[in-house]
Amino acid sequence: FETITGRAGPLDDTPRRLYRITLANYFAAAVMMPYQAFHSAAEALSYDVHVLAQRFNAGFEQVCHRLTTLQRPNARGVPFFLLRVDNAGNVSKRFSSGTFPFSKFGGTCPLWNVHSTFDTPDRLLKQVIELPDGTRYFSIAQMLRRPVAPHPQPQPRFAIGLGCEIRHATKLVYATGMDLEKTEGTPIGVNCRLCERENCSQRAEPPITRTLILDENTRRVSSFAFSNAREV
């Protein structure tokens, strides 16, 4: 670990320790799910997360996280992205080997069904989503319960969202039988502060790139109206 962390150059104590923890976690995943064996199984099983979890004696979240790391030049897997949120919308994990534009801060779009998993705890949900620029993605989502919580604390619950660009979705067992070209994508944004979609009934905040318009005499679908021109 010291050799690898040394390649990053001089680091303060806190980032160096975080780096070591991250490396240790990655090493543990690599031992449990060796790259070549895991990549071959993922391809053969059409990226069935639950079957992969059983085969490698791992959890759903562990398998999803490992899937985002399969990008060796000579053995690439589907370039997935992963998100973990709690039932208040707080994001605690963001990983991407693809092009999904995560924000570094703030929550996510409430129209993404990763949030709906808390209402359907025993079901895996799938969804085609579309960003304001027209880019389409296929995603699956499922709620997880942490196995142990000290009494009398409530059992922690998280939702995992795993997705990829729509052009890769045909490789996934979850897209079997779907006409992805004709499936209408749910219009989402990265989060409200970065989304410029108008007339969204779920909007919690106006976009930082537009000028807020206040009209005392008009009630709109959204609580916020804003100009079409971007602020410079």
Image (cartoon, rainbow, N blue to C red):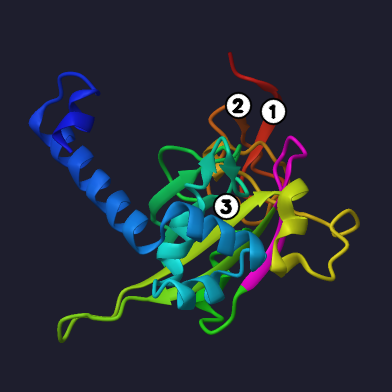
Q: Residue at x 46, y 67 (%)?
A: 159
Question: Is the residue marked by circle 1 packed among few (<14), some (14-19), or many (20+) residues within 10 Å?
Answer: few
- Residue 109: mark in rendering: 3
Q: Position of residue 49 (x, y in %)?
A: 55, 69
* Left or right, residue 90 beside residue 1: right
- Residue 227: mark in rendering: 1
Q: What is the residue that sits farthest to the top in this orientation?
A: 232
**Mark 2 / mark 3, whichever is N-terminal:** 3
Q: Position of residue 83 (x, y in %)?
A: 48, 54
Front in this rendered view, residue 168 or 31: 31
Q: Quadrant of residue 116?
A: bottom right
Q: Answer whether labels 1 and 2 touch (C-beta < 8 Å).
A: yes
In the rendered structure, which amino acid carries the disc numbered 3?
A: Cys
- Residue 211: mark in rendering: 2
The answer, for residue 86, to whether it is visible in the render is: no
* Left or right, residue 137 beside residue 59: right
